[in-house]
Image (cartoon, grey):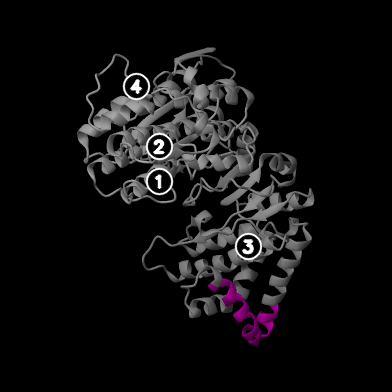
Amino acid sequence: MKVRLPISKSIANRLLLLQAIHGDPLMRVSSDMPDDVLVLYDALARLRDYKKGEPLTLYLKNCGTALRFLQVHLEKCYPGEPITLTGDERLLERDGKPTSQTTSARILHGEKVPVEKDESPYITMSRKIAEAYPKVELEADWSSAAFWYEYVAIHGGSLFLEGLKEDSLQGDKIVADIYAKYFGVETTFVRGGIEINTRALRRQYEVILDFTQTPDLYPSVALTCERLGLTLKATGIERLRFKESDRIEAVKQHEVRNDHRIAMALMCADYPVSIEEQACIAKSYPNFVPQHITPIKGVNDEGKGKKFALSKLIHAATSEYMWLHDDDVVLPEATQKAVVLEGDMIILPLRMESLSEKPTLLERLQIAEYAAIQELTMRTAKQVKAVMCSGANLIVKREVWLACESEIHPEIPSGDDMFLLEAAKRHGYKVSVIDNPDYTAIVRPLTSWKAFFKQRMRWAGKAPHYTDCDIIRCGRLVAVANILQFLCPLLILFKFPIEWSLIKSREPQTKWYIALLLEILYPFYLLICLIGGLFRKSW
C-alpha cells in the first residue's frame, strides 16, 4: 500500500527564509502543504509588500518555527519597524528562550555560528541548506513517516512511503534505526521511497532512548511502547512541555490538546480522536489519514479455499475495519483516504479496463456489462437496498465478519462477498457506499469465452441460496425481463434505453452498438449461465 507523505516543513521553511533574504521569488505553495509552511509563506509575502513606518501585524497561528525565524528576520532586515508578531494563545505562552530555530535563522542570515559538540540536527540542516542554496530540493518528511512506523509496529503489515531519501538532510531519519532495533520494523530503500514491514523480532522489555536531538519522534515511540507493552526510559524530553502542547502529559493522558503530532500518534495507536480534534493535523500533514483498515494480503488457504483464508486472516487482525481487495485488482489511488467511514460495511466502486489498446469483442462486452452491474450496485446501495457488492473492493468491520462468517456458505466456492452482504443486512448492520472515482479499483476482463462462462456459471450457482428480499426481487426482475425478451424480441426497444443509461453512467466512452449487441445476446447468455450454474456441481 502506497502512502503519500507531506514535504518536510523544516526544509521548506528554511528555503522560504533564504528566498526572502536573497530577494528571490518565493516557492510556490499549495493547500496540501503543511500549515506551518503556508503561515511562514504568507508572512514573508506580506513583508515583500511592506512600506517602512507602517504598522503591520503578522498572525502566526501556533507556528513556533515562523515565530523564531521572523524574530531574527525582523531584527536583521526590518530593525525598528512597527511590526508585531502574534498568534494563538499557546504560541504566546511559549518561553522566550533561544532555540535551535533561532540559531538556524541566524545561520541562514549569514552569521558565523560556531559548531558545537552534539549540535542539533536542525542546526546542521540549516548549515547544509545555507551552503547548498539554491540547489537544495524539497523532500518528504521523515518526522511524518514516524507515524506510519508506529502504525506498522502496532498493526503489522507493510507500506510504501513515497519521497523519502537515504541521504536525507533530516535528523528524524533515525526513526528507521529506532524501529528496526526495538520494534522489528524493517526499512528497505527503493526507487522513489522506502518500504517498511514487520519482521520477527525478540523485542526487549525496555526501550532506552535520548530524544534531545529528535524530540518530534517522542509521541510515536512512546505510544508504540505503550501499545506493545514495553517500558520506555526517555531522556532529553524536557522541552517537550513547551511545544504545541505539553507533549509529555498529552501522551500520558491520551489527549490531543490541539497538537498535530499527538493527534496523529493517538490515531495510529487506535485511540479515539474526534473529527474536530483532527483539524490540527493540517499543521504538518494535511492529507494524513490513519489506517484503521487492514489491507487483506494473500494468506495460505491450506487447500480449503478463499473463504477459509479470509476468515483465518481476519481472526488474526486487530484493526476495526478490513479493506478487502482481490489479488489481481489495481488498487484505488485514494487507498489512504477511505477512513472517514460511516457504516459497518462499505461498498466501493470497481471499473473494468482492458490491458490491450484494442480490446477484443469479448472484453468490450464484459466492460459494458460490468459498467451496468456497477451502476446498479451503487444506485441500490445508495437507496439502502443493496443487492450487490464485490470483495474485490469492499470495506467491512471486523465485528461484522465475525458475526456473519457462519452464514457465508463455505461449501460454495464463491460468494463470500454476497453472502456477507446478505448476513450483514439480516443482522441489522449499516451498509453504506463510497461512490467516488478516487476509491475505484480496476479489474481486468477475462480473455477467453471458456473462462468467461465458467466464472459466470460459478456466480449463477449461488442464486438458489440467496434469502435477502432485495436480492431475490432484483434477480427475478432481471430473469423475467430477459425471458420475455427471448419470447418477444421487440421488448428490446424498452429494455435497451434503461440498460444504455446504466452503462453510459459508468463508461461514457462505450459505443452504442456494443451495448446493443450485449442487450441482444444477454437472454441467451443468461440462460446458459443459469443452467450451467445450477447443475454444475464442481469447479
Q: Name the residue tied to disc 1.
A: 55
Q: As drawn, which residue projects farthest toward the bottom?
A: 490
How far from the left and from the top, in percent, is residue 427? Answer: 79, 48
Q: Name the residue tied to disc 3.
A: 378
Q: Nearer the viewer, mark 4 or mark 1?
A: 1
Say if the magenta span includes residue 3.
no
Q: Label 1, secondary structure: give it.
A: loop
Left or right, 82 with respect to 491, comes to left
Q: Which mark is residue 120?
A: 4
Q: Label 2, secondary structure: give it.
A: helix
Q: Name the residue tied to disc 2.
A: 66
How far from the left and from the top, in percent, is residue 330? Answer: 46, 52
Query: Taking the image as drawn, is residue 272 in sight?
Result: yes
Q: Amino acid at mark 3?
A: Met
Asked whether 170 or 453 is in front, the reply is: 170
Q: Label 3, secondary structure: give it.
A: helix
Q: Amino acid at mark 4?
A: Ser
Q: Nearer the viewer, mark 2 or mark 1?
A: 1
Q: Eyeballing the image, is 372 above or below 348?
A: below
Q: Amino acid at mark 2?
A: Ala
Tell me if label 2 and label 3 are in contact, CB under 8 Å: no
Q: Amino acid at mark 1?
A: Pro
Q: Nearer the viewer, mark 1 or mark 3?
A: 1
Instruction: Identify the residue shown where x is 44% and y is 48%.
Output: 32
Q: Callout 1: few (<14), some (14-19), or many (20+) C-alpha neighbours within 10 Å? A: few
Question: Magenta-highlighted stretch: main secondary structure?
Answer: helix
Q: Which residues are magenta?
A: 483-504
